[in-house]
Image (cartoon, rainbow, N blue to C red):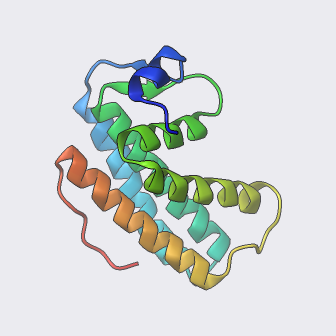
Amino acid sequence: MPMSLEELEHDGLIRRLPADPRRVEEALALATRDLSVAGSMLTVDPDWAYAIAYNAMLQAARALLFADGFRPAGKNQHGVVVRFVAAHIGSDEATRLDRLRRKRHITVNDTAGTIGEAEAQAAVARANAFVDLIRGMIGTGPVLRDP
């Protein structure tokens, strides 16, 4: 069962942060940049396209965290962001994000060539949908693009 935002804060996994719209915009700008780069890498290197698509999702989730007045704290901040997504959006989105996180870790740190082009394309499409979802939640509107 996902932890609530209050539980995440109580356990020191997230900390309150003064509202800073610029920080939200910067995280969304990173997500937008990463979506573009991930799409351009699809035929060049599916491993990197996948990794960058994950990073777009991570940055979008961080934007939501910042918009809600929090920041991740402590170790394993990527995992904390996944837990925040579970608490704020739901376990389905968190599960998808966590799957990409785990596989990205393998392809970046352990084994090259683990991601095929179709899987990379699916990751980029998933990242586009996720960033659009976050933009809608924050109120900045969708970003229109093709993977």
- Residue 87 as seen in the image, left or right of residue 54: left
How many discs appear? 0
Residue ID at (21%, 54%): 136
Residue 3 as seen in the image, left or right of residue 143: right
Q: Is residue 26 above or below residue 98?
A: above
Residue depicted at 43% across the width and 73% down the height = 125
Question: Looking at the rendering, which quadrant does residue 100 occupy?
Answer: bottom right
Q: Tell which of 22 and 99 is nearer to you.
A: 99
Residue projecting furthest to the right: 110
Q: Quadrant of residue 114?
A: bottom right
Residue closer to the observer: 79 or 37 = 79
Image coords of residue 88 (percent x, y): 36, 40
Residue 122: x percent and y percent? Answer: 51, 76
Which quarter of the rendered picture does the C terminus lie within?
bottom left
Residue 65, by quadrant, is top left
Task: Residue 117: give x, y in percent of width and height.
Answer: 61, 83
85 sits left or right of 141 in the view: right
| Left or right of 92 in this view: 22 | left
Q: Nearer the viewer, residue 145 or 68?
A: 68
The structure residue drawn at horizontal position 49% and vertical position 38%, both measured from the top left corner, is: 2
Rendering coords of residue 28 (x, y %): 33, 48
Q: Residue at x 72, y 58 (%)?
A: 108
